[in-house]
Image (cartoon, rainbow, N blue to C red):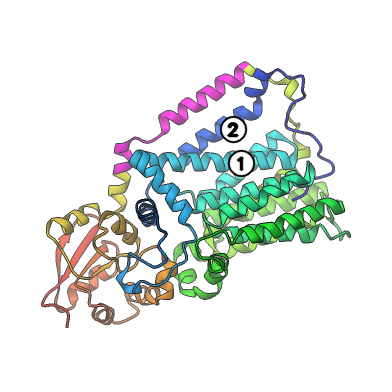
Amino acid sequence: MSTASGVAERTAGPAGVPVLQRVFSFPAMLAGLLVVLAVLTVRSRFDDPDMWWHLRTGQIIWTTHTIPLTDLFSYTTDHHVRVPHEWLSQVLIYGAYRLGGYSGLMLWLCLSTVALLIAGYALCCLYSGNAKVGFLGAMIICLFATSGLSIRPQMIGYLLLILELLLVHLGRTRNPRWFFWLPPLFALWVNCHGTFFLGLVIGGAVLLCSLVNFRIGPLVPSPWDSRTRQMLALALLLSVAALFLNPVGVKQVLYPLNLMMHQPINLSQVEEWRPLQLTDGRGLIFLATLGSLFLVMIVRRSELFWDELLMLMLGIGLAANHQRMVFVFGILAAPILSRLLAPLWDGYHAEEDRALPNAVLIAASLLIAFWSFPGLQNLTRQVDVRNPVKAVEFMKTHHLSGRMLNDYTYGGYLIWAAPEQPVFVYGGADIVDWAGVVDEFGKWATLQSDPSTLLDKYGVDFCLLAQQSPMVRVLPLLNRWKVIYTDNSSVIFMRVGGVP
């Protein structure tokens, strides 16, 4: 991204500002508020259905010192080959659990969210030249991030995306040597999450726009000298080479393309991959953000850089097609909106700062964050409410064996809590999509196919389903299926008389 020529104010104070005043500065106080916001936002988000199988995969890598290259969890995929595109993130997640159990996992989530918001704040501050407006940009990122804040590898992927934007901005405005942090960033990124491909697209878009030297109405080129452009091009070439520092080589580099082109069932049936509903709350906020951005441009006759236009188009396209990508839209749109709003608000002046009030607010923020951190009892209760905890205990005490068909959202927890029992389907939807299981299960769960066909095909002996599943009403009507366990959230059905 580029920096507006009309906004030259730096967020850093002059050299004469005392050290204590810099430490307890106004921007530091705002960062403290972001710490509180992060903890309050995620304190009730401990349990994500996919967290559990990521945790189990990390445990396997940690204990065996090998990275699984086939599916180990579902009997329906027949050990299908898988691309370990998140293996390093999974190890980090398990490392947090190993150090502190549930509390360690929640601390991982809180710190990841804090890092993401503060990095976003730094990006918006530097990009707009205004620390006050930069805080508004961080709030925009937080607002759209609520679609994906969870204990999952994507948290690391989105943090690295913000860091990439920071490096590109610093290389463009401060020193081109900042660009050469991009190759190690991508070497880390390719092993943490598939969003590295998006980062590569963004880097290429910025480089392409650096070649544009004409304007069309409010669309203007950003000034690039040839040396800076050449260094960015070299850094991106090295970044592409760095992507091959992964366990499986080219397959891991091409995995995001495989997801987009060869997993249609996954993208169409998994809720977070479906198009954004513009009539719900997040969709309305999405439209309001876009409206505000273009309204500011029209009223103030602001200019938009070509690379900013591409970032917006990319963010809009991703968010409109996939709900989970509103997170990316927030990251890409926030610094642009911050730059456009910067002239409307007086900037931060370090020499006018008041260290004592800032220090009090920073201390209060950290204290509130500490007291807001959920205790073990709270975390355990979240797990109990959202997972078949008692049903798994029943399975173990009654030694249920054989092939199990499980609710989709239960798969991850079963992989962690009952690793001896292979699951039918789980959140690793790329594998079950390739094996054709997602399509079959989706039709079965929504009563679009003969219920007995799937059960007989896979030789299912018992079913563990959520109470709200439509099949809970259907299975009792079939021959040879009876309820052997039920509670407020789960039901277990057993086949009577064996598989035909």
Residue nearer the viewer, 165 or 289:
165
Q: Distance between the residues labelled 2 and 1?
A: 10 Å
- Magenta stretch encompasses residue 61: no
Give the quarter of the image for residue 186.
bottom right
Q: Where is residue 120 in the image (x, y as percent from the top left)?
A: 62, 43
The circle on residue 119 is 1
Horizontal and vertical percent for residue 495?
15, 73
- 20 relative to 322 in the view: left or right: right
Name the amino acid type tagged 1.
Answer: Ala
> Dot 2 corresponds to which residue?
31
User: Cβ–Cβ below 8 Å for labels 2 and 1?
Assistant: no
Residue range highlighted in magenta: 356-380
Main secondary structure type of the part rendered in magenta: helix
Question: Closest to the observer: 468 or 269?
Answer: 269
Query: Residue 397: in sight, yes or no?
Result: yes
Question: Closer to the N terminus: mark 2 or mark 1?
Answer: 2
Q: Kindly state the secondary structure of the residue where label 1 is placed.
A: helix
Is 427 displayed left or right of 349 in the figure? left
* SS under mark 2: helix
Query: In terms of image quadrants, where is residue 15?
Result: top right
